[in-house]
Amino acid sequence: MATTKVQSELIVDDVALAGNPTTTTQSAGNNTTRIATTAFVTTAINNLINSAPGTLDTLDEIAAALNDDPSFTTTVNNAIATKLNLSGGTMTGNLTLQTAANPTITVLETGAGGVTVQGTGSGGRVYSNSGQSLLLGGGGQNTHLAISSNGRVSIGDTSTSANNLRLVNASSAELDFVCSNGKNFRLQSTNASAFSIIDKDASNANRFHIDTNGKIGIGTANVDAKLHIEGNSDNGDADCELVIEDLDTSSGSQVPAILFKGNGSTIGRIRANDAQGILISGGSTMSDDLVIQNDGVGIGVVPPAHSGLGEMLSVNGGNLIGVGTSGAYVGYNMYYNSGNWKYQEGGAGSAILSFAASGDFTLRQATTGSSAGDTISYSETFKINRSNGYAELRGASDVRMVFGSTGTPTNNTSNWIRAAGSNLMYNTPGVHIWELNGTARLQIDANNVLRVGQSATNSAAATVRAAGTLILEGADANHRIIMRGSQSANGTVTGNTNYMEFYEYGSYTWYTNVITSSSSRTYGMALYDNNLKVGDHSYNSTDGLQFYGGTGRLFIDTNYNSFGAEIILVNNKTASGTVALLQYRTNSTAEGTVKGDSSGLSFHNNSDYRKKKQIRDLTGSLDVITSLRPRLYKYKAGFGKPTRDFVGFIAHEIQEKMPNLVDVEKDALYTQQDIDDGASYVKVGDPKYQTVSYTANEMITRLVGAIKELKEENDALKTRIEALEEA
């Protein structure tokens, strides 16, 4: 550089410094025209960055972070302007809280006012203050639910001072309970029908109802009394039961009861006692006027410890015992226990009338007993045997039956029949006379004369042969053996009332309760042309029984609607015995049997391999069973069926796949040939209604076959699924 360029301490022209010239580094923040060394520049830049992260320590990185927006400040200000100010404002969009758990909005009111969340227009609101706690409503300022600070809830108004839960509505207040399993109930209170519990899952059935008169209905809203329980025993006995339970665990002191009062005074009571049974009291004294126990009933007395023989009704020492189908007993001062008859009270005798299931009637008597509970030793004094019609007087070697008031029974001045040892004697102070329609038919007089016939002469139509044969002869075939009542002491029949007759006129017929004056009689039994008819039987018209001996057919007509009306009753007195109750045979070979034993009835059909040939496996059962069409239907009028729905099949639809299960063809009618072959009580053209044998071998076999085929298909599918799962 020329020296002319250096003037004093200044260099006049530009200078290019080669090498590594140095100079003094100025202090940070120096803002003069002095030379800045690299150290000065590095310090200035580091101070500018001020330990910024590596991704924001250049202007390019900062620009990228600001989205290269030259108007970044304006953009941010505009975005902030859309946010809700801390001092309040209006939000125009939805508010979403999202956090891992328990998102919370806290509204803190520090003054004496309230906090309100209000919808615009007629929208709802949530309001809370220190006085009302929490109010919820819909439709402007309305309050539909209020929750007080002590947890009481009111729905419909804001009053929570008296009730833990209060529902208010001008016409009907309702509260629904919906369970997760789908069961729904409703509590309902209306101005018209008071309070109800409604079963929403049973077509709004009214399960519990209290009307405005304080009457309570269970199962009905149509209440007829203070407590009205309604149900349907077809759904089970419990559907119509009222249970009163005493939880006392002490034996003999469990006494649930129903008390009846009239104007504050006790007038009756029904109670149960675990030791004494059902006790019914009338009046205010609460005495047990009627006592019902497991084996007996007492009227005015607690029934004795009767057991082991039917059920007992005791009325102040007079007793009636029913033994179901085994018979009955009527007597005085007796009961049955431990296999013996016992005196009910001491110091008195006992008598008992026995009515057996066989129809026998017996009178037994006993002398005075010493103490209550002593075993009675009865003597049989009179018996009527139904099977042979015998009337028996027993109890002594000399017994007699006295008729009428003539004379003295203990001597021969009265009318009597007497049995003395092996002898039978008849006595009358007059003449022995047998009459018919007021006319003497047979007489024995004091002169030992026997007269038989129309005029009681020896030319009678009835004679007694030496061989002991009684022969009845007459102009016609209508002979009758008649037993009558209403006979006077002198042997005159004063009226043909209430007598039984048996007569033969090409047949044998028994009548009872014949009253000739009114031409009335009760049809008993008839035997004609090998046929037996019991009762005045007429098919589908009059009850009775008719047995056709020539063809072996039996017809029975009854008119009952009770499970306890046993039409055919078979009683096997061998407890563990088994009987073939009914058996069908073809040419003496048994085909099927209804067997009975202590477990009930069972049906057995012959299926022995020795009767079969060409035995093969049955196939296609699943297709047959799945082709059946289960139906729901009602019966038409005129068939005597209930009006409810029935479940079953249509016969001709089953016939298409299993014809052997259906007896006749679809729409079949009775023909004259059917009637000639024995069809009864039908006429030509009557419908032959199809019937289905659901218990037949084919139906059961098809069901078993279908199950096996389903199993084979399921096994195959299972194998395929297992193969797919293993693949």
Image (tube, rainbow, N blue to C red):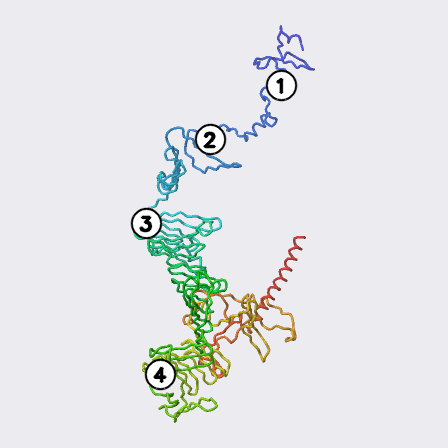
Q: Nearer the viewer, residue 96 or 219?
A: 219
Report the amino acid beneath label 1.
Answer: Thr
**Disc 4 to disc 1, C-alpha distance:** 170 Å
The residue to which callout 3 is attached is 191
Q: Is residue 484 above or below residue 36?
A: below
Residue situated furthest left in the rendering: 263
Query: Where residue 341 sits in the image (x, y, percent)?
Result: 47, 65
* Image marks 4 and 2: residues in contact by CB distance under 8 Å: no
Q: Nearer the viewer, residue 120 or 305?
A: 305
Tell me which numbered mark, 1 or 2, is placed earlier along the sequence.
1
Residue situated furthest right in the rendering: 19
* Residue 123 showing in the rendered view: no
Report the amino acid beneath label 2.
Answer: Asn
The residue to which callout 2 is attached is 78
The residue to which callout 1 is attached is 42
Looking at the rendered structure, the number of numbered marks drawn on it comes to 4
Tell me which numbered mark, 4 or 2, is placed earlier along the sequence.
2
The residue to which callout 4 is attached is 429
**Disc 4 to disc 2, C-alpha distance:** 145 Å
* Image marks 4 and 1: residues in contact by CB distance under 8 Å: no
Report the amino acid beneath label 3.
Answer: Asn
Q: Callout 2 environment at 10 Å: few (<14), some (14 to 19), or many (20+)? A: few
Tell me which numbered mark, 1 or 3, is placed earlier along the sequence.
1
Tell me which numbered mark, 3 or 2, is placed earlier along the sequence.
2
Query: Where residue 112 sits in the image (x, y, percent)?
Result: 37, 29
Label 1 SS: helix
Mark whose residue sits in front, 1 or 3:
3
Tell me which numbered mark, 4 or 3, is placed earlier along the sequence.
3
The residue positioned 58% from the left and 80% from the top of the image is: 587
